[in-house]
Amino acid sequence: MSPAVDRDTVPQFVLPLVVRIEREAPPTRTAALEAAARGVLAFLADERSTEGEWAERVTEWTDGRIRKVVRRARGAEWRRASALDGITLEHEGAEVRVFPPVPLDAWPKELARLQVSGTELDDPEPPPAPARGIPVLWFNPGLEMSAGKAMAQAGHGAQLAWMRLDAEARKRWAADGFRLAVRSAPVTTWPALTDSGLPLVRDAGFTEIAPGSCTVVADLPELRLRGA
């Protein structure tokens, strides 16, 4: 996108994500966040997004504010959503489907009827420390968000990191299955992370948190080696 174009003046598109939440076996919060981030990456890397049938909509979306909205589904709702074009990412018991961008006010009816609320997920135990050497999406430890909001923020962080990488680094990450971890940053290290030059998500403030809030830092070894 040209720097002269105002992101708020172009037609606004949104990237829909749907998380499967069955009553009997909901995913853990961390697994859902990681699945959302990896799903966004898989969508961006897909040939349909780069040069195929989704490419034009992806360009229109990225010319705007790269908004993402997460909704929940179960049972028949999930089956109807899964029948639409998109990519499903399964990760540690979490299933997230990412769909091509849609106009902000023109969602497919199968997705428009799904609920945004009700994405409250928990971790039975604190997640372990991230494996050494893998990308980590560090969340602001001072902000509280619903799981749905946090999934969108994780997707933003993954996307900003993807946009910083060159073609070879993207291929390596894709070959590794977009391995990553999502964790809450230690309170003591969060200020340094936000000043590190690594990709930083600042929320537009449409829902839940104040505009301009720093939510996620994408900490990738590839970017640290290059001095971010």
Image: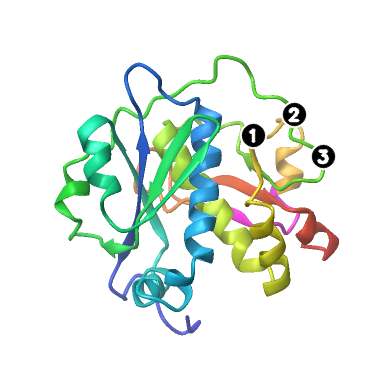
Determine crowd level at label 1: few under 14, some 14-19, many 20+ residues with C-alpha closer than 10 A: many
> Which residue matches tag 1?
183
On whether residue 219 falls in the magenta region, the answer is: no
Counting from the top left corner in percent of width and height, residue 178 is at: 63, 52
Q: Is residue 108 visible?
A: yes
Determine crowd level at label 2: few under 14, some 14-19, many 20+ residues with C-alpha closer than 10 A: few
Horizontal side, residue 171 vs residue 61: left or right: right
Counting from the top left corner in percent of width and height, residue 18 is at: 34, 43
Q: Which picture quadrant has residue 221? A: bottom right
Report, in whole angstroms, how far the alpha carbon at label 3 lies from the one at label 2.
9 Å
Element carrying mark 2: loop
63 and 38: which is toward the camera: 38
Q: How is the image coloured?
A: rainbow
Q: Return the mark for residue 132.
A: 3
Element carrying mark 3: loop
Determine crowd level at label 3: few under 14, some 14-19, many 20+ residues with C-alpha closer than 10 A: few
Above or below residue 85? Residue 59 is below
Amino acid at circle 1: Arg
Amino acid at circle 2: Ala
Per the rendered image, the range of residues in magenta is 194-202
Answer whether labels 3 and 2 touch (C-beta < 8 Å).
no
Report, in whole angstroms, how far the alpha carbon at label 3 lies from the one at label 1.
13 Å
User: Which residue does the image show at 22% across and 39% down from the upper left?
Assistant: 114
Answer whether labels 2 and 1 touch (C-beta < 8 Å).
yes
User: Which residue does the image show at 60% across and 38% down from the upper left?
Assistant: 139
Q: Residue furthest right?
A: 225
